[in-house]
Structure formats: structure tokens, C-alpha cells
Image (cartoon, rainbow, N blue to C red):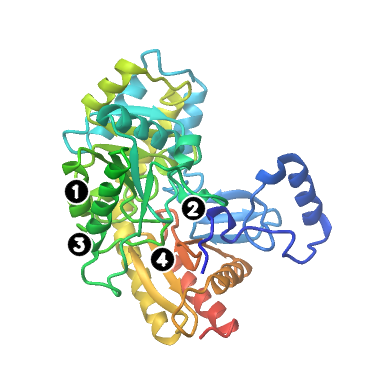
């Protein structure tokens, strides 16, 4: 079975979809004309949303949908505290961060206080792609090596440099010669030696990079292996791999764009679940709850070595408005107990999905941590079932529940809602999934 690029997972394809007719078809024609080949939409029948609140999105007809997919508005769509903070600061000042501003400094100190002591410098960007791009440059400059190790279906962003280490973006050809791909950790159901196996794959990749003369600059992974199909267990599974990279003189870059800011439920940062301290941490999407923010947290000596050679600035990263958004997100995470909510509701959701698996044989596995959950869909032989996954996502869309897809073959249902997702929301999602699987004859 061939792997599937991330942009193809549940994407609208006019060549494969029935004629939609009416105003929707006219809108799609306008969109295609304006954006060309870069126009990517979800679902066989795309959606138009005009409003959002909490875990709810509202379409042009006023119909409400349960959002169990979007982690960008991590504390909920249009959270009033974030909206007010951003609006207030926009009315006062918004300028680049090469001027002093108390809000930016307050945010930096507050954010850095959540990281282990060696990680004491913050560089602010606008996106996770920019963050990962800078992190790779820091690693190459500091180590003097060029090789990078990532997982087989990784996605780390879309700059030129980061695309080279995002195999799930490459639709034709191969990743860069200095990149080595390793399998993501297997499910605990498949192996009891998950951590040892992953460390062995990383060690072999290091040796191959050294034979090629590139050496190991960095291991770049997110702690929940989100694009590979969500492999969160067991806690600690990264320890051996990180030790191997450090022995080889490389750095561990923790991509926290997906699993950071409390999503796993048991720690603010995904790497903390694994008992390891990164050399560099990259941040993005959830940082500003929809306001474009990103960041790189690193050991000072890495940033000093890089800036001595290149220097760095970001026009919009760390603006007063960005700092206001970031501070407001931290306020809400703490004030509303959203990390605890992720742990509690996530555990309930996984338990209910595991019950569902007992009566729906198409559910091959349920994995995750906190409010990041993956559901493997399989055919009667136990093989990955990407066509079924696509049908399920579209069936849920018709029942006004939104989820995504992940995994090398696109057969893993990706459930990644805003962190205000409630127990009632979880019950609604599971009931809708049960209904869709039954209607598709997958049960």
C-alpha cells in the first residue's frame, strides 16, 4: 500500500466528487480561479464557515458543527478573553519587536518559566514552519553537521528547508539526501519493546548519516507522532533515542506545535511525558489561539553560535499584539484548567472509543494522550483502510462532526479538538462515529 501525502487526506477533489451545483459550485470555481493549484479544501462537499465559539463552528446557513479537529484555536474558537486582549492592544500599538515593550518581555519571561532550566532563550516567529526552519539552522550551525532524522510520515512545516524534512508533504520524488527516515514507534498492541525499537532505528539512522559524511545534526520529532498516526505510549519512549543522538553529537529538537500547551493532559509540553530535556523546542499554531504566533526555545549557547554567524530577526514575531494573544492564551489555560480537562475528557473519550471497538471490528486500535486521539480503521484482514477512513470523515461531516486523518496511509482518524472539549462533546462524537460505521456496513 502506498503512503499518502498529507494534503491528499480527505481533500476535496473535483475530479472525484459529484457535481455540487448551485452557489457552492460557483464559490468553488471562484476559489480555484483565485488560488489555483494551491487551493486545498476538506470533504467531498466543502464547508463554508462564518462564525465560531468554543468547540462549535457555524456555517453560512447557520448550522452548527462540533469541531473535534482544530488545534489552532486551542482554548476555543473566538475565546472572549483572547479577543479582548488582542483588540485592546491593536487599539494601542502594533509594531515589530526591535523596540522595547513590556508586554513582549512579560510574555517571554512567563513562557520561559514553564521550561526546564537549560532552555532559557526565546526567539519569536509567526508560524511553526518558521520555528522549525530556525531550529534546523541552529542545529546545523552549532553541531557542524547536516544530517536530520525524522519519522516516515512526519510533517514539520512548509518552508523550503522544512519541506525537506516533511516526507508527508513530498508528493513526487524523495526527501533530501541528508535526511534519514525512521518508522514511528509502533502501537503498544504491536510490541512491548516500543522504546527500544525506536532507539534502535534512530541509532541505525545515525550510523548511516555518518557513513554518508553528513553526520547527525538533529533528531526532529513531535512527542505524540501526530502525522504518523498518533503514538503516545508508553511515556518515556523517546529517552533511548535522544541519548543516542546526544552521544553522536546531535541535538534533539522537540516539535511542540501539535502536542504542546497542555494537549496531552499530563504536562504542558509533550516532551515532559518522556522524561527528556530537548536542546531546542519549537512552538506554533495553538500559541495565539488563531493569532499567527510561533517560537523557538533554546539553550543560550545555540543561539549565540547562530547569531554570531548569521543574526536573526522577525518583523511580526513578538509584536505587542502577538504578546497580548500569547499571554491571554496562558491566562485561559491556567484559569479554566484546560490541561486537567484534556486529561479527564481525553481519558473518557478513549475509554468510550475502546468500548466502540468491541462492537465495530473496523476499529483496529485506539491511541493517544489527553485530547489527541487516533483511531486506526482496518479492513476485515486487519490491513489499513484509508478508503473507509475517508468515508467515515465525510459521514461524520454529514452528521455535523468534524475530524481529520493521519498516518502513513491516511487510515487513522485524527481527533484533536479545542481543549474546552467537554464530556458531552465526547459522547456525541462517539455516537456519531458508531452510527457512521454501522451505516457504512463496517461493523
Of helix, strand and loop, which one carries label 2? helix
From the viewer's side, name the closer residue of 125 and 207. 207
Q: Earlier in the sequence, mark 3 or mark 1?
A: 3
Quick check: can you spot residue 232? Answer: yes
Q: Earlier in the sequence, mark 2 or mark 3?
A: 2
Q: Residues within 10 Å of mark 2 (few under 14, many from 20)?
A: many
Of helix, strand and loop, which one carries label 1? helix
Which residue in the protein does label 1 denote?
A: 244
Q: CA distance from mark 4 to mark 1?
A: 28 Å
Q: Which mark is residue 374?
A: 4
Q: CA distance from mark 2 to mark 4?
A: 17 Å
Do labels 2 and 4 touch, CB within 8 Å? no
Q: CA distance from mark 2 to mark 3?
A: 25 Å
Q: Earlier in the sequence, mark 4 or mark 3?
A: 3
Which residue in the protein does label 2 denote?
A: 168
Mark in front: 2 vs 4: 2
Do labels 4 and 3 touch, CB within 8 Å? no
Q: Earlier in the sequence, mark 2 or mark 4?
A: 2
Amino acid at each position: 500500500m502506498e503512503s499518502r501525502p498529507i494534503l491528499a487526506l480527505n481533500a476535496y477533489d473535483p475530479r472525484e466528487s459529484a457535481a455540487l451545483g448551485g452557489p457552492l459550485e460557483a464559490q468553488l470555481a471562484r476559489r480555484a480561479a483565485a488560488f489555483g493549484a494551491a487551493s486545498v479544501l476538506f470533504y467531498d462537499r466543502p464547508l463554508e464557515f462564518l462564525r465560531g465559539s468554543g468547540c462549535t463552528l457555524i456555517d453560512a446557513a447557520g448550522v452548527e458543527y462540533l469541531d473535534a479537529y482544530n488545534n489552532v484555536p486551542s482554548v476555543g474558537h473566538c475565546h472572549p478573553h483572547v479577543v479582548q486582549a488582542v483588540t485592546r492592544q491593536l487599539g494601542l500599538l502594533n509594531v515589530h519587536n526591535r523596540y522595547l515593550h513590556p508586554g513582549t518581555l512579560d510574555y517571554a519571561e512567563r513562557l520561559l518559566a514553564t521550561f526546564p532550566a537549560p532552555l532559557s532563550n526565546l526567539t519569536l516567529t509567526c508560524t511553526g514552519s518558521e520555528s522549525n526552519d530556525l531550529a534546523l539552522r541552529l542545529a546545523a550551525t552549532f553541531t557542524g553537521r547536516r544530517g536530520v532524522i525524522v519519522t516516515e510520515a512526519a510533517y514539520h512545516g512548509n518552508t523550503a528547508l522544512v519541506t525537506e524534512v516533511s516526507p508527508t508533504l513530498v508528493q513526487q520524488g524523495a526527501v533530501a539526501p541528508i535526511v534519514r527516515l525512521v518508522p514511528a514507534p509502533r502501537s503498544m498492541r504491536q510490541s512491548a519493546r516500543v522504546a527500544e525499537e525506536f532507539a534502535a532505528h534512530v541509532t541505525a539512522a545515525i550510523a548511516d548519516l555518518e557513513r554518508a559524511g553528513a553526520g547527525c545534526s538533529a533528531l526532529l520529532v513531535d512527542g505524540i507522532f501526530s502525522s504518523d498516526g498518533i503514538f503516545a505510549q508508553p511515556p518515556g519512549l523517546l529517552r533511548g533515542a535522544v541519548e543516542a543522538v546526544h552521544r553522536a553529537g546531535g541535538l534533539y529538537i522537540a516539535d511542540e506545535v501539535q502536542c504542546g500547551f497542555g494537549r496531552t493532559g499530563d504536562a504542558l509540553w509533550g516532551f515532559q511525558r518522556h522524561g527528556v530535556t530537548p536542546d531546542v523546542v519549537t512552538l506554533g499554531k495553538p500559541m495565539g489561539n488563531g493569532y499567527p504566533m510561533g517560537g523557538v526555545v533554546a539553550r543560550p549557547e545555540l543561539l549565540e553560535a547562530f547569531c554570531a554567524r548569521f543574526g536573526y530577526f522577525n518583523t511580526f514575531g513578538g509584536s505587542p499584539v502577538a504578546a497580548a494573544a500569547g499571554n491571554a492564551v496562558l491566562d485561559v489555560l491556567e484559569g479554566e484548567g484546560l490541561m486537567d480537562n484534556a486529561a479527564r475528557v481525553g481519558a473518557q473519550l478513549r475509554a468510550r472509543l475502546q468500548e466502540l471497538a468491541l462492537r465495530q471490528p473496523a476499529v483496529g486500535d485506539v491511541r493517544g494522550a489527553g485530547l489527541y486521539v487516533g483511531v486506526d480503521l482496518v479492513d476485515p484482514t486487519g490491513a489499513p483502510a484509508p478508503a473507509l477512513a475517508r468515508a467515515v470523515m465525510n459521514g461524520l461531516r454529514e452528521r455535523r462532526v468534524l475530524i481529520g486523518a493521519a498516518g502513513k496511509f491516511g487510515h487513522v482518524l485524527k481527533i484533536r479538538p479545542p481543549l474546552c472539549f467537554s464530556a458531552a462533546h465526547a459522547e456525541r462524537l462517539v455516537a456519531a462515529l458508531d452510527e457512521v460505521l454501522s451505516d457504512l456496513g463496517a461493523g
